[in-house]
Image: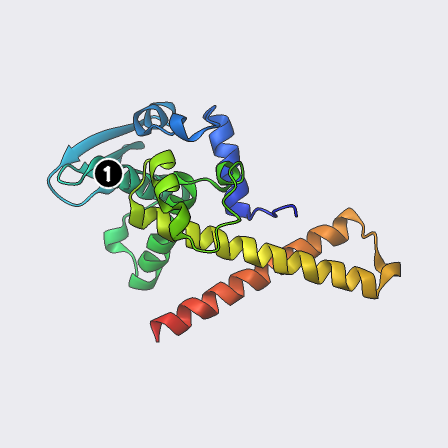
Amino acid sequence: MKYQMTTLENKIQELYSYLSISSPEDIEIYCIAEKLDIWIHYWSRGSKMQCTDGLYSIVLDERKIFKEQRQDFFHELGHVIRHVGNQNKMYEHFKNLQEYQANNFMYHFCVPTFMLLNYNLTNYMNVNDGVDFVSDTFNVTKGFAKKRLVHFRNQWSQAKSDEEHRRYMESRYPKAAPYSDETNNILALALEMKAKKRKEDHQCQNNI
């Protein structure tokens, strides 16, 4: 089965290609910061991103262990790439949205899907079996690795379900296939929106 990457996953792969990074051991925050013209500083408070006169800095919490600092760096990098403005003056719901987007970026950038697909992780029925491998390979904490693997497993299951449904529809309506590229793009977008809606509904249920 061919995995259908999301828009975010594709954009992150494109960014890594721009950075000339293709393997986990090359994901190094100082190298990435230098290529993106971002300064890294440390202090004894929570990590944050700041922009002064168009120059970006990421200030990391020096009290955290290195793996946690890396995770914070990529969270703040998500703000640099996706967001502008002062969060402190932002309406609370928009601030929460940006934090969610930055977290989502962090999980995908720390452990990119296009790299995960190079490993035989889809056979793990229990994500705990892959936690140590992902933690060591991508230099993230075990808690982070577990959350990323759960998300990856859910996406893979959804892709598998979509593929089975597509094959069923093609077998039931053989004259409809093969579809044009335009139709395939529309179907792929519809499936992605469906998966996103299911995820949002699931998150809403968890918040109740």
Scheme by which the image is coloured: rainbow
Residue 30 seen from this side: yes
Q: Residue 60, percent across and down?
A: 20, 37
Lateral position of residue 143 relative to residue 171, left or right:
left
The residue at the point 55 percent across, 53 percent down is: 156
Nearest the eye: 118 or 99:
118
* Residue 201, above or below 189: below
The residue at the point 25 percent across, 36 percent down is: 58
Quadrant hosting residue 157: bottom right
* Element assignment for label 1: helix
Q: Amino acid at mark 1?
A: Gln
Nearest the eye: 6 or 151:
151
Residue 83 seen from this side: no
Lateral position of residue 172 relative to residue 193, left or right:
right
Q: Residue 154, percent across and down?
A: 50, 57
Q: Which residue is mark 1?
A: 69
Mark 1, Cα crowd under 10 Å, few <14 / some 14-19 / many 20+, is: many
Nearest the eye: 185 or 70:
70
The residue at the point 57 percent across, 58 percent down is: 158
Residue at the left extreme of this rendering: 44
Dividing the image into 4 quarters, which one contains the C terminus? Answer: bottom left
The residue at the point 43 percent across, 44 percent down is: 108
Quadrant hosting residue 150: bottom left
Residue at the right extreme of this rendering: 175
Q: Residue 90, percent across and down?
A: 29, 56
Q: Residue 28, percent across and down?
A: 34, 28
Lateral position of residue 124 relative to residue 93, left or right:
right
Lateral position of residue 78 relative to residue 123, left or right:
left
* Residue 170, above or below 36: below
Nearest the eye: 3 or 205:
3
Residue at the bottom extreme of this rendering: 208
